Image (spheres, helix red, strand yellow):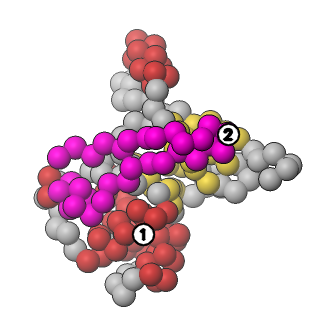
Amino acid sequence: MEIICNFVIEDYVTMQPIVNIPGFEEFKSQLRKHNLRATSQRLAVHGAMMELVHASADMVAEKIAETSKVKITQSSVYNILAQLALHGIYRHRLSINNKMYFDVCNAKHLHMYDMARHTFRDLPANDIFDLLQEQMGKKRFRGYKVEGVDVVILARPNKKH
Ligand SMILES: [Zn+2]
C-alpha cells in the first residue's frame, strides 16, 4: 500500500490545510514492506507523530511521556525516527534553529516554515515541484546526481498575530 497524503484546502486565509496523516494500519503496512517489526516503541513514535506531524526527537519523546505508557529514551526515539526517514516512511526536515525535524507525511508537499516559532505547516503539492524537478534535473553538478527538490517557504508572523 502506498501512503498518499491528501490535502484539502479549507481556508487559504488562515492557511490551515488538512493533511491526511497515515493511520496505524498504513504505518504498519509500511513497516512490513521494509521488514521492520511493529514494536510498541515504533507504534508509540508514530502515535506521537500523528499528532505532531512535524517534530524533533525531543518533542516526540515528550509527547510519548505525556500520552503513552510506553517507556522509551529520547535517543531511542531519535534512532527510530532516523530509521523511518532512512526507509522513506518519514522524511527529514532541517529547521533554522538547527534541529532535525521529521515529517510524518512522505508524499510530495510544500512547507511553510515559521521562522519565529520554528514550526512547519504543510501546503499542497502543486506544479512547482514538477517544474523545478524538470529544470533542476537538467542541471549538472560535478560529482552529484540530483535526487529531488524540496520547497520551503520562509515566513515570519505578522505583528498582528
Ligand atoms: Zn510536511
Q: Is residue 115 left or right of residue 6?
A: right
Could one spot residue 136 in this view of the protein? Answer: no
Residues packed near mark 1 inside 10 Å, few (<14), some (14 to 19) or many (20 plus)? many
Residue, disc 1: 48
Q: Residue at horizontal 51%, vertical 77%?
A: 62
Q: Position of residue 80 (x, y in %)?
A: 33, 66
Q: Position of residue 6 (x, y in %)?
A: 38, 41
Secondary structure under the numbered disc 2 in the rendered image: loop
Q: Residue at horizontal 30%, vertical 59%?
A: 23
Q: Position of residue 60 (x, y in %)?
A: 47, 70
Task: Name the one closer to the observer, 15 or 50.
Answer: 15
Query: How far apart are the two marked residues, 1 and 2, measured between alpha carbons?
Result: 28 Å
Query: Is disc 1's CB within 8 Å of ligand 1?
Result: no
Task: Name the one closer to the observer, 17 or 97.
Answer: 17
Residues packed near mark 2 inside 10 Å, few (<14), some (14 to 19) or many (20 plus)? few
Q: Is residue 108 left or right of residue 153?
A: left
Task: Name the one closer to the observer, 79 or 120.
Answer: 120
Q: Is residue 16 left or right of residue 63?
A: right
Looking at the image, is mark 1 or mark 2 earlier in the sequence? 2
Q: Amino acid at mark 1?
A: Ala
Residue, disc 2: 13
Q: Amino acid at mark 2?
A: Val
Vertical arrangement, residue 66 with respect to residue 56, above or below:
below
Q: Residue at horizontal 75%, vertical 45%?
A: 156
> Per the image, is 14 magenta?
yes
Q: Residue at horizontal 45%, vertical 37%?
A: 109
* Boundaries of the magenta span: 1-30
Query: Is disc 2's CB within 8 Å of ligand 1?
Result: no
